Structures are given as structure tokens and as C-alpha cells.
Image: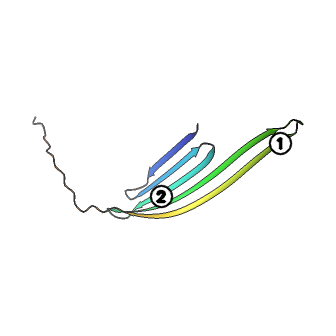
Amino acid sequence: MGLSLSLNLSLSKRLNLRLSLSLRPNLSLILSLILRVGSGLNLSLNSSLSLALSLSLKLSLSLHLSLSLSLSLSLSLGLSLNLNLTLFKLELGSESKPKI
């Protein structure tokens, strides 16, 4: 069970910003920035932040209560370059317009 939220914002024809947040047993935030340079060249910068939180409660026979909280944080940043090239494109079909 968890909650996932995604926001996609197109700033212009060439710039696209995507933000996704998911709340599951851990919290992760992914920020993706996609820049279209040409017709087939996309430059994307991805940054992800994940936060894991674990809580454990132990009760022993001597009624000693122990509570432990563990927190881990990891940040990763990556740059990827995607090149899509269309060499040949063929479209077949007919279009009819009604006459009035």
C-alpha cells in the first residue's frame, strides 16, 4: 500500500519537466528534466532522492521496551543522452472530406 504522485510540466516545445513522488515503505523523489535539442536529440537530467525509514519495536519478558529508528538517505544524479534518428518514414492512407 502506498501513494504515488506524478507531475509532468511542459514549459515549452523543447523543455519538459517531470516530478514524481512516491510514498511507500520508503520515500523517493525523482526529478527529470528533458531538453529536446533537435528533432531526434533528447538530453535528459535525472536526479533521484530516496529516503528509507524503518521503525522497530521490541518487547522482551523483562518488560524492557526498546525502540529503534533507522534513517538512510541516498542521492543519485545522472545525465543521459538519447539520440533517436528516423531514417525512413512511410505513411499510407486516404482521407475523405464530406461535401456540403
State which tag comes first along the sequence, 1 or 2: 2
Residue farthest toward the front in the current orientation of the protein: 61
Q: State left or right for residue 60 relative to residue 34.
A: right
| Residue depicted at x 22% and y 60% | 88
Q: Nearer the viewer, mark 1 or mark 2?
A: 1
Q: State left or right for residue 36 relative to residue 21.
A: left
User: In the rendered image of this protein, does residue 51 appear above or below residue 45?
Assistant: above
Q: Position of residue 61 (x, y in %)?
A: 87, 35
Check disc 1 and give the amino acid type: Ser
Nearer the observer, 4 or 71: 71
Check disc 2 and give the amino acid type: Leu
Give me the disc on residue 66: 1
Q: Secondary structure at mark 1?
A: strand
Q: Position of residue 72 (x, y in %)?
A: 68, 54
Q: Position of residue 23 (x, y in %)?
A: 60, 43
Nearer the observer, 86 or 68: 68
Number of other residues with Cα within 10 Å of mark 2, as a class: few under 14, some 14 to 19, many 20 or more: some
Q: Real-space Cα distance between discs 1 and 2?
A: 44 Å
In which quadrant will I find the C terminus? Answer: top left
Q: How is the image coloured?
A: rainbow
Q: Secondary structure at mark 2?
A: strand
| Residue depicted at x 51% and y 59% | 46
In which quadrant will I find the N terminus? Answer: top right
Within the image, what quadrant is residue 63 found in?
A: top right
Within the image, what quadrant is residue 98 found in?
A: top left
Q: Position of residue 67 (x, y in %)?
A: 80, 43
| Residue depicted at x 56% and y 45% | 22
User: In the rendered image of this protein, does residue 48 appear above or below residue 23?
Assistant: below
Residue farthest toward the left in the current orientation of the protein: 99
Number of other residues with Cα within 10 Å of mark 1, as a class: few under 14, some 14 to 19, many 20 or more: few
Give me the disc on residue 81: none
Disc 2 target residue: 33
